[in-house]
Amino acid sequence: MASDPSFVEYVVDQFDRDCGVSPRKMFGEYGLFSDGKMFGMICDDRLLFKPTEGGRAFIGNVVEAPPYPGAKPALLIEAQIEDGEWLSELARITTRELPEPKRKKKTR
């Protein structure tokens, strides 16, 4: 089941503007990006973050779930989905720990 675009818009609106969160449709679901890094996903109307040590420490009682069958588990965010300040801080922590995106080679 694909995520509802209105749910995606709702989630993105929760983040502080300075996070610069933008959704991108990917494989029928949505990736969440900040500073050019994909830090999370919205799959089947569920918000998931990439697992990082800092993210785990910030969350505390972590619940993991795969975004889709066969995928590696991600950090499932449920109760805090309406707390924009909390989500924004988790996004900042997560993006700081993720590697810089690889530059695409130009084709001639």
Image (cartoon, rainbow, N blue to C red):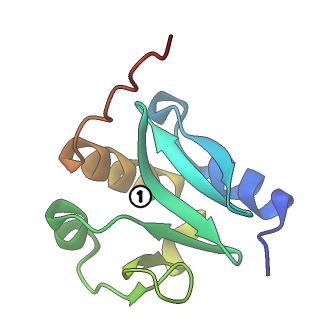
Residue 72 image point, x, y percent? 37, 80
State the residue at coordinates (41%, 58%): 86
Q: Is residue 5 left or right of residue 83?
A: right
Total tally of numbered discs in the picture: 1
Q: Is residue 83 left or right of residue 45?
A: left
Tag 1: amino acid: Trp
Residue 83 image point, x, y percent? 52, 61
Question: Height in image: 101 above or below 57?
Answer: above
State the residue at coordinates (51%, 31%): 20
Q: Quadrant of residue 5?
A: bottom right
Q: Is residue 23 left or right of residue 54?
A: right
Q: What element carries label 1?
A: helix
Residue 70 image point, x, y percent? 47, 88
Return the residue found at the far front.
108
Residue beneath label 1, please?
A: 86
In the foreground, 25 or 77: 25
State the residue at coordinates (83%, 67%): 4
Question: Height in image: 73 above or below 15?
Answer: below
Residue 41 image point, x, y percent? 54, 62
Q: Quadrant of the N terminus?
A: bottom right
Q: In which quarter of the image is residue 82?
A: bottom right
Question: Height in image: 77 above or below 106?
Answer: below
Question: Height in image: 70 above or below 89?
Answer: below
Give neighbour class at mark 1: few <14, some 14-19, many 20+ (Cα, 10 Å).
some
State the residue at coordinates (29%, 73%): 59
